[in-house]
Image (cartoon, rainbow, N blue to C red):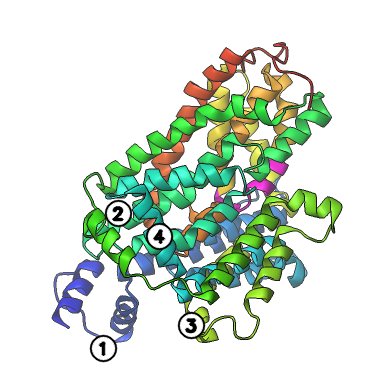
Amino acid sequence: MAEIRQQAELSAGVGGPISNTGFLGQFRANILAAGLSPRKTMIGFVVAWALFFFILYGMPAPAGLSPQGQATLAVMVWACTMWIFESIPVGISGILIPMLLVLANAVTPFPKAADGFTTPVLFLCLAAFLFAAIMQAAGLDRRIALSMLKWMKVKTVNGVIWAMFAVNMVLSFIIPAANARAATMLPVINGITRFFGDTEAEKNGKKAIVIQTLVYGSMISGMCIITAHLPNYILVGLFDKQLNIKISYFDWFVMQWPYLGMFALTQWWVQYYFKTRHVAVAGGYAAVQQQHRELPKTSQSEWLILAVFALIALAWVSEKWLTQHVSPRLLSHNTALIGIALLFMPGLFGFKWKELQDRTIWGTLLLLAGALSLSSAMASSGLAKWFADVIHPLAEGHAWWMILLILMAGTHVIRLGMLSNVAAITMLAPILIALAPRFGLHPVAFTMLIADTDTFAYILPTQITAAVIAYSSGTFSMTDYAKVGWVSVLIAIAYGILVMATWYAFLGIPVWDPAAPWPFSKAG
């Protein structure tokens, strides 16, 4: 109890003991009991609501922004502030977003404001969370983690990260979405992080593994393979329709493979920030071997669970063929739910529903739904377009690299309130293609450099579905993610301007030359 009181004193920033009596004292005691900092939590809560009401009622209407757009801006700022300060549970913030959108008159009626709760990606994530819960309850996550660690002879945090990046690259060829790869790897990563204890160094090791593997690794590996990242399809389709330029699978890899080098830079930064250079897996490789030997023989139920999981993974990989030749309804979210139906056949496993319920991160699911609703409101209210209209003219008259810098920074501002890469690229890419000739820049190189930086929206977990999945692991806080993420965003911007723009020029499509002929074959 004395330790708890001492922690409360430090968290509240006061010199004497905190009394549990009185109105504020009881609030502080309850916040502390929830494992949060009283000062940070209460400040964030007040600031979030103050900004919400100021933007809604006190701030003069910005030129060109509709009342609905201003109302959506108020909700976006409120949500971002709550997420950064962690003033309320993230699941509750997700539930409140549709209500705020309606009451602020940003979006009506309520079903439209809450459309994030009915979107297919939400059910895909729900199925992924249930898959993870089943694998954990069956002990498969630990079995897979031990097998992989034993095979790769991983002994340190950095070894785990590089081994998992290799897995990410392999999965990029067969799983056509970063969020699906993150969902596939979540049980394995959870199993690996359980080998670490609760010392500060080991906690930081877990944070580094989850962030670098499930978020940075999933996104960076997806940049290189045309089928590994959904925004890739959007860009290729637009180039074909608007510019009559067809980019093949191989052409895309040739253009994008240097992004693999960015993983080394983010790994260096994450390792430096979390101080994980010498943090080892508890017990070392000998412990991994011993624990692997102690595993019981794989049961029939476990083999059946793995078989169903493999079947669904195959369906995800062959989604295009299935929808064209079998049924257009066999999309990834539907096949995922078919897998759930198969897994809940009576007698398949011996654990109760409560064991799965307790392992499913419902709060994260609600957070995802609310973020999707906010993303949709930004588009429908005109807020996202207003942001683009305000930011883009600022780049006129500057050198090519300054134009890239301004628009990349502006893209990351817009992405603070958007979860979906697909939605963001769908909105931004046509504008970027239209802007390229006005700036006197190559349309493909310019559009790809700006669109690619959108993928590296690393400031809030709610900006990327893969990050939402990573956040469900419970290993890091919103603050942890933001502190390491803003530098990673700067790395991504610098990498795009210094490395990728140079590479495109070497290939024959310099961003500063709008008349450069397309260097690749016109064949699709």
Q: Within the magenta stretch, is there residue 481? A: no
Taking the image as drawn, is residue 98 in sight?
yes
Q: Secondary structure at mark 3?
A: helix
Q: Quadrant of residue 436?
A: top right
Relative to 44, 433 lies left or right: right
Check the picture and name the quadrant holding the N terminus.
Answer: bottom left
At 58% from the left edge and 29% from the top edge, which residue is drawn? 256
Marks 4 and 3 sit apart, C-alpha to C-alpha, by 20 Å
Residue 205's disc is 2
**Nearer mark to the viewer, of 1 and 3:** 3
Q: Which residue is mark 3?
A: 355
Residue 439's disc is none
Q: Secondary structure at mark 4?
A: helix
Q: Position of residue 488 (x, y in %)?
A: 42, 40
Marks 2 and 4 sit apart, C-alpha to C-alpha, by 16 Å
Of 11 and 315, which appears nearest the observer?
315
Q: Which residue is mark 4?
A: 145
